[in-house]
Amino acid sequence: MFALPRTGRLGVIAQRARAALSVLLLRGFSGCPRFPSTSNVRPPTITNRGRRSFGFTLPMQRDPESVRGFTLLELLIVVGIVGLLLVLMAPAFTYIKGGTDVTSTAYTIKGVLDTARTYAKANNTYTWVGFYEEDASQPSVIPAPDPLCPGCVGRLVMSIVASKDGTYIYDPDDAGTENFIDPARLTQVGKLIKIDNIHLPLFELGTGSGDTFDARPSPAPRTDAPFSRFGELNSSPTAPTTNTKFPFQYPVGNPAPAWQYRFRRTLQFSPTGECRINSTYDVRRVVEMGLLQTHGTATPPPQSGGGTSFVTWDGNVAAVQISGFGGDVRIYRR
């Protein structure tokens, strides 16, 4: 832009032009055929110095789609689709595939045990964690073979239940192993958990001299091992170390639903956090659960002690130990 001269001949012409413009502004542009009243063209404006601006401001054009929002119907459709997907993607159980080692499985089991103990203490009640091993090469059979799946290896199934009324429900003086805890008096804690490519074996005892896998704490005396190692529940052919006297089923509720799994290998937590194998065993210094990585149903060969209750295994192994009195959980890896 250029400034109009203020002196000389051209300055006089410029002053006359300004005067003419003032008259035009007083009359308004609406009377001008070139600027109808419906025009979007802005007339000259007065600046803060009292000068009129000769620039014209044109309205900004916007894409109609850029200002269009969602309708209520569209939002409801989207919410409905998301809800349907969540229902389809959340089955009745949590299924966890085995990884390249047992670390994730060990921490999953630790989380299950911590959940059961915390629930028992927070709600002043009893909780039970059930363990069942099935054939990883086949889809789960419902109802699962009972009292156990013969020769089944490779998939661990776990469930947590709790007493609704704060009691342990069963009668400790009952005999036999078919005294199922009343499912109508139990509540499910979390979902059913399944883990592939894992087996619960028996390990050679630790020396108790350190914090490594081989030096981990162990039952004392050695003869107490069948009552302190959860793996005994998978190997012993006869009661009491095979089955609990007080198993429970999955699912639970009132009225009692048809069972899909029967858990006869259990850990019980009391309202004070104490842990017992099979509900009725005495509280042990440590309870150990051995974990061995498998490839489907194939397990690695043992280094030594094969066919006994004290085996040294090749492969990826871990031991999850929980203290009987405090309920603290620790993991030992080789």
Image (cartoon, rainbow, N blue to C red):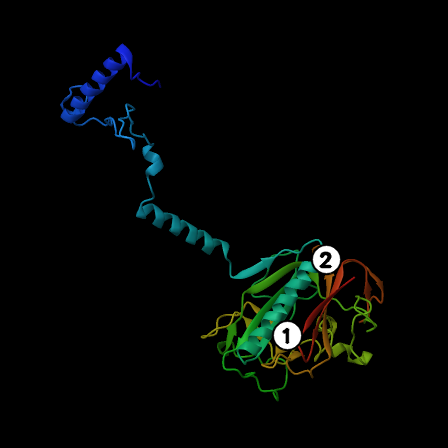
Outermost residue, front direction? 8
Q: Amino acid at mark 2?
A: Thr
Side of 32 relative to 53 (left or right): left
Dot 2: element: loop
| Drawn side of residue 104 relative to residue 301, left or right | left
What residue would you read off at disc 2? 294
User: Residue 233 occupies which quadrant of the picture?
Assistant: bottom right
Residue found 45% across the figure and 56% down from its top? 87
Residue 145 makes an appearance in the image: no
Label 1 neighbour load within 10 Å: few <14, some 14-19, many 20+: many
Relative image position of residue 94 (x, y in whole percent): 56, 60
Q: Which residue is mark 1?
A: 266
Alpha carbons under labels 2 and 1: distance apart = 23 Å
Rendered position, 77 above or below 154: above
Q: Identify the element where label 1 is drawn.
A: strand
Residue sitting at the far top = 9
